[in-house]
Image: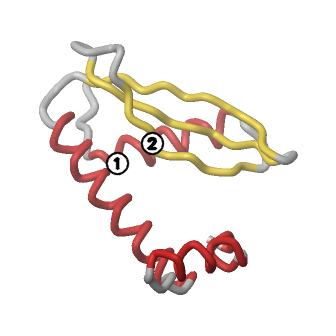
Amino acid sequence: MNKLRHPSMKKLANFCGRELPSVTASIQIVKQIADRQIETIKEKLSNQCVFFICDESEYKSTNIVNVMCGLLSKPGETYLILCKPVSAANSENVSRLVDDAVKLIGTQRID
């Protein structure tokens, strides 16, 4: 969000006749958009069999765990549910994040 403070962004906004939102307002807007997306994903996945994919990546020496999910009936269509930095991508952290993703989309577990 600090990119909004860059002089070129301010110049672009002035050229378009708009004011840039504050960083705080931008964060709120992003949260609202993310919440709407999660609700849309929940609706698509409700009462269906789903799968989860967990992936680890590294960005600027920070380990990041990405949790994606999709419908078993449409395996080519996946949704990013969580993307969190972790100290280490060990089994404890990964299983916790997958559990968080399951709860986030409201999926029922089948034993």
Q: Residue 103, labelled with which disc?
A: 1
Residue at position x 49%, y 46% from top? 82
Residue at position x 54%, y 82% from top? 14
The quadrant the N terminus occupies is bottom right
Q: Whole-percent x and y of residue 60?
A: 84, 47
* Crowding near the residue tagged with mark 2, few <14, some 14–19, many ≥20 C-alpha atoms within 10 Å: few
| Residue 19 relative to residue 10: left or right | left
* Crowding near the residue tagged with mark 1, few <14, some 14–19, many ≥20 C-alpha atoms within 10 Å: few
Q: Whole-percent x and y of residue 59?
A: 78, 43
| Residue 44 relative to residue 71: left or right | left
CB under 8 Å between discs 2 and 1: yes
Name the element at disc 2.
helix
The quadrant the C terminus occupies is top left
Residue 3, compared with residue 35, is above or below; it is: below
| Residue 22 relative to residue 73: left or right | right
Residue at position x 57%, y 72% from top? 12
| Residue 42 relative to residue 24: left or right | left
Residue 97, compared with residue 18, is above or below; it is: above
Residue occupied by mark 2: 99
In which quarter of the view is residue 45 placed?
top left
Name the element at disc 1.
helix
Residue 2, compared with residue 104, is above or below; it is: below
Viewer-nearest residue: 19 or 61: 19
> Which amino acid type is shown beneath numbered disc 2?
Asp
> Which amino acid type is shown beneath numbered disc 1?
Lys
